[in-house]
Image (cartoon, coloured by chain):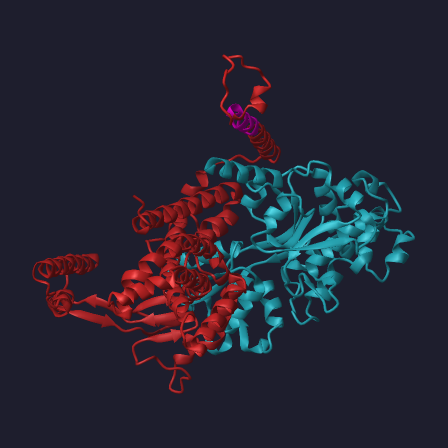
Chain colours: A cyan, B red
């Protein structure tokens, strides 16, 4: 019987892995809802507000894709995923896309067979310590206890950083951001490390954010972006170009305020192509002509989404930095809509 | 079956397969086996096809690749450059450690609570009933979180030990109770032979003492058989246990390394990590409640007549318990105890919840996650838990066979 047990479990795993072979876009349209994987709650990036409505920077991407495909930015089923469950959820087809500040890495792209459709936030791993500790550099952290979210690239970067600097540390692996926050605030770990944006977002929720400092060292490159499964290129294109539409809209000065006016037709052909009054880009994607207009209509262009959720005016207070438009010295650069 | 006067001579008909009780069970077993094989074959084929569709292949090559992450509690040498296989072994040892510790303490909790619940003292028995009911009826997951949260929130952090106006102080000046764990003095030998050799000598001396005391009790029994008087063995046994240890510690220079604040944490001494304590305590106290009920059932299963008969023979109450009641009660207690031990082992997989690096956390958590080899990792995990569970059952079954009612 023991053999059958193993086989039974094997087959269960196989059954769970029934490939979502049909075109994802058809599934989404038939369902009338986009299943979008987000974090279990990281203020500014993806977290439900007081009314239970999901909002945030990553949520903005989900809503834009939903609007592009279904014409309704609210037709999204948000699926909270942890660092551990996110890839299984995407690979098994439980979610159509993952927008969960996920780092684009070689092995995730190639070995795990996912397709990263762009970078919506250029990030790097940082450290947060209580001000009272008097630490000014990550290299002073010899012997410190470090809280990390398990199942993320931060875990590996951390090991590399401490090994490269020949200093020791004690890792405390934590499953979710909320738990890590609790451990850190109770003093069970000296340092909390994750992406610098995540640290800023976490710190913003503290009672006394001023008592904690982010160390200057950024120890890794963390290009965060939405991703989909390998193998459905059309769906990958839709997600990629929806995001590009948001970036291009900012570049071309299309905002939620002037969207209606612009979509009546302008004398800039690229805006016309983007908003569907000229050319047939929407048709090429298999979407309606006003797909990009719908996507931008949800919460505005990339810059507007950034400012509303994590920008300097918010409690998280991140500056655009690397995430500014290429014209302003940042890395946000969308290929042309042509 | 009625006896047939004229049995039919080898006239086998197909309908006999169903209507003849000699063949019926066999027929159904064959049918069930075929159906099961077909079902398994279908599912296996489906699995293979799906894996191929997703471009996945089962491969255990990732086990030899450097893991790249660090583990906070390791019983064997491990760095972030060690392989995933070694990380899995670190996890396995951590699982076995917490399972062993929790089994031992759960048994103690369970036996104490089970016996006390039968106490004639109303307050004691009700208190134990309260313990059993409250711990048995709340999921162990919640207990783990409650205990860990209380530990981290209530105990002082190492920071609070620092400075002149420290808000926390070390216990007796030698141990520190912090929310990262408990730091206790570490014994070591100043002029020993270095490292593990010293401890091997100590263990050898303990084993020697064990056999020596057994020999002494046997001799005492032999004298008792011959003369009817049992010589006192307590003093000699104590001497056998302690004299070699004292001599050893004097010769090799036993000293203690006292933990002290170093940098961010306490350094030196032995650290028992907070996660280990939380998961250990939670599993023990939760499963202890179940074991308490087993113990109570076992004792109640021995009829009162046994106690009365033993008393009538002139045995004192303690001897009645140890010679008459307990050996019989054990027969009832042991079988369910096996499943409690298995539960502890399997429930220890919740350890990642408090950041304890058991095998589910290393192989089934970080390794799985960083390599993306979910099916392989889960298969290995299943294999491990299966083997451990079967081993525990086997060992306790051996014990059970030794104490069960011998029918002749």
Left or right: B43 in relation to B198: right
Left or right: A93 in relation to B239: right
Residue B28 belongs to the span the image colors magenta: yes
Residue at the image point whose x is 25% and y is 70% from the top: B316
Provide residue B34's location: percent of width, then percent of height: 56, 26
Provide residue A165's location: percent of width, then percent of height: 40, 60
Q: Is residue A79 above or below residue A7?
A: below
Asked if one can make out residue B111 in the rendered structure from this viewpoint, the answer is yes
Residue at the image point whose x is 86% and y is 41% from the top: A279
Q: Is residue B319 above or below residue A298?
A: below
Q: Residue furthest bottom?
A: B165
Relative depth, front residue between A281 and A56: A56
Provide residue B273's location: percent of width, then percent of height: 39, 66
Residue at the image point whose x is 50% and y is 12% from the top: B9
Relative depth, front residue between A77 and B4: B4
Residue A279 belongs to the span the image colors magenta: no
Left or right: B62 in relation to A254: left
Relative depth, front residue between B95 and A57: B95
Where does the magenta region start and end? B22-34
């Amino acid at each position: 019987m023991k053999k059958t047990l193993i086989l039974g479990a094997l087959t269960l795993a196989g059954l769970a892995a029934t490939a979502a072979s049909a075109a994802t876009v058809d599934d989404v349209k038939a369902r009338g809802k986009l299943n979008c994987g987000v974090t279990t709650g990281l203020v500014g990036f993806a977290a439900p507000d007081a009314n239970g409505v999901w909002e945030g920077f990553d949520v903005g991407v989900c809503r834009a894709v939903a609007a592009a495909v279904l014409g309704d930015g609210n037709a999204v089923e948000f699926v909270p995923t942890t660092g551990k469950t996110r890839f299984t959820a995407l690979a098994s087809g439980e979610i159509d896309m993952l927008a969960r500040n996920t780092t684009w890495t070689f092995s995730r792209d190639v070995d795990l067979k996912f397709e990263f459709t762009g970078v919506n936030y250029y990030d790097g791993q940082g450290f947060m310590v209580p001000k009272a500790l008097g630490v000014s550099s990550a290299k002073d952290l010899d012997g410190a206890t470090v809280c990390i979210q398990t199942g993320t690239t931060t875990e590996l970067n951390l090991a590399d950083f401490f090994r490269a600097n020949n200093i020791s540390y004690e890792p405390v692996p934590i499953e979710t951001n909320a738990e890590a926050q609790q451990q850190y605030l109770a003093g069970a770990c000296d340092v909390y490390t994750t992406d610098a944006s995540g640290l800023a977002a976490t710190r913003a929720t503290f009672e006394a954010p001023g008592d904690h400092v982010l160390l200057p060292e950024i120890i890794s490159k963390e290009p965060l972006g939405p991703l989909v499964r390998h193998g459905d290129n059309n769906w990958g294109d839709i997600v990629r170009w929806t995001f590009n539409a948001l970036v291009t809209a900012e570049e071309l000065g299309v905002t939620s305020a002037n969207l209606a006016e612009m979509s009546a037709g302008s004398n800039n052909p690229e805006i016309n192509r983007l908003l569907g009054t000229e050319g047939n880009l929407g048709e090429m994607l298999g979407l309606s002509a006003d797909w990009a207009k719908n996507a931008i209509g949800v919460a505005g262009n990339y810059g507007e989404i950034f400012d509303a959720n994590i920008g300097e005016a918010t409690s998280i207070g991140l500056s655009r930095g690397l995430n500014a438009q290429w014209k302003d010295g940042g890395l946000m650069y969308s290929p042309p809509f042509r | 079956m009625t006896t047939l006067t004229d049995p039919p001579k080898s006239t086998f008909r197909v309908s006999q397969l169903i209507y003849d009780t000699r063949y019926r069970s066999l027929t159904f077993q064959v049918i069930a086996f075929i159906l099961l094989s077909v079902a398994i074959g279908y599912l296996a084929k489906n699995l293979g096809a799906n894996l191929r569709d997703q471009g996945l292949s089962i491969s255990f090559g990732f086990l030899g690749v450097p893991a790249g992450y660090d583990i906070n509690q390791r019983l064997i040498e491990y760095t972030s450059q060690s392989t995933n296989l070694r990380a899995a072994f670190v996890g396995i040892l951590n699982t076995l450690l917490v399972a062993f510790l929790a089994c031992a303490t759960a048994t103690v909790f369970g036996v104490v609570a089970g016996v006390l619940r039968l106490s004639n003292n109303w307050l004691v028995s009700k208190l134990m009933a309260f313990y059993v009911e409250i711990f048995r009826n709340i999921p162990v997951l919640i207990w783990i979180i409650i205990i860990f949260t209380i530990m981290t929130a209530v105990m002082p952090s190492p920071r609070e030990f620092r400075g002149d106006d420290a808000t926390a102080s070390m216990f007796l000046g030698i141990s520190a109770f912090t929310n990262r764990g408990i730091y206790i003095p570490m014994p070591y030998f100043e002029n020993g032979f270095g490292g593990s050799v010293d401890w091997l000598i100590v263990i050898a001396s303990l084993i020697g003492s064990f056999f020596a005391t057994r020999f002494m009790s046997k001799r005492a029994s032999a004298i008792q058989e011959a003369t009817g008087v049992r010589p006192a063995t307590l003093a000699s046994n104590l001497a056998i246990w302690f004299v070699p240890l004292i001599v050893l510690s004097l010769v090799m220079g036993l000293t203690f390394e006292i933990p002290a604040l170093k940098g961010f944490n306490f350094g030196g001494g032995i650290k028992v990590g907070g996660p280990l304590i939380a998961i250990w305590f939670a599993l023990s106290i939760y499963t202890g409640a179940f074991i308490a009920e087993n113990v109570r059932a076992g004792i109640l299963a021995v009829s009162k007549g046994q106690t009365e008969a033993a008393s009538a023979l002139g045995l004192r109450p303690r001897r009645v318990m140890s010679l008459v009641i307990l050996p019989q009660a054990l027969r009832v207690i042991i079988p369910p105890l096996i499943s409690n031990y298995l539960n502890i082992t399997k429930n220890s997989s919740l350890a990642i919840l408090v950041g304890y690096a058991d095998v589910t956390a290393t192989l089934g958590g970080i390794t799985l996650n960083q390599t993306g080899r979910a099916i392989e990792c889960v298969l290995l995990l299943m294999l491990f838990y299966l083997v451990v569970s079967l081993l525990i059952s086997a060992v306790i079954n051996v014990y059970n066979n030794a104490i069960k009612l011998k029918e002749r």
